[in-house]
Image (cartoon, rainbow, N blue to C red):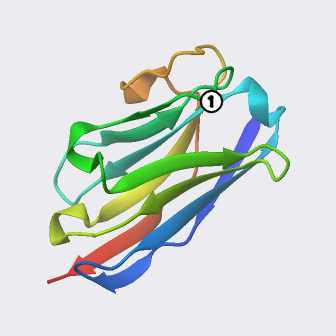
Amino acid sequence: QVQLVESGGGLVQAGDSLRLSCVASGRTFNQNTMAWFRQAAGKEREFVAAISRSTGRTYSADFVKGRFAISRDTDKNTVYLQMNNLKPEDTAVYSCAADSFRTVPSYDQYAYDYWGQGTQVTVSS
């Protein structure tokens, strides 16, 4: 079992930055490939970024490349999502997820075994 707790969301203006955190407990952190997804109101959940459990290689959706970056601190069992130059269309609930099987991250939400409760990010124009 893995427990995930996100934090760091909030209300910001367009162009601002936020850093989301996801603390994992339970199963050893580096045994899970970690990812961030987001879901805007009325829309499907979509992949944002992920980091491989074995190599630490990162993967990002095209729409966030150059603005968002995923990273991890294995000593703190924490994965981060640094979000820069936020836009109103980035408004969503952001959730972290853990995949205990794959070393190459999947972009499919159904590949992930464990989820946090999510943190709201709202970007005003």
Q: Amino acid at mark 1?
A: Gly
Picture quadrant of residue 53:
top right
Q: Residue at x 30, y 51 (%)?
A: 66
- 16 sits to left or right of 52: left
Picture quadrant of residue 45:
top left
Q: Residues within 10 Å of mark 1 (few under 14, many from 20)?
A: some
Picture quadrant of residue 61:
top left
Residue 86 x/y as whole percent: 27, 69
Residue 22 x/y as whole percent: 63, 55
Q: Residue at x 36, y 24 (%)?
A: 108
Judge whether residue 68 can be spotted in this image: yes
Observer-nearest of 113 and 79:
79
Q: Residue at x 51, y 67 (%)?
A: 19
Residue 70 x/y as whole percent: 51, 47
Asked if 13 appears above or below 22 in the picture, the reply is below
Badge 1 marks a residue whose secondary structure is loop
Pointer 1 residue: 56
For the image, the number of numbered tags is 1
Asked if 99 appears above or below 89 in the picture, the reply is above
Asked if 72 appears above or below 52 in the picture, the reply is below
- 79 sits to left or right of 14: right
Asked if 7 appears above or below 74 in the picture, the reply is below
- 122 sits to left or right of 80: left
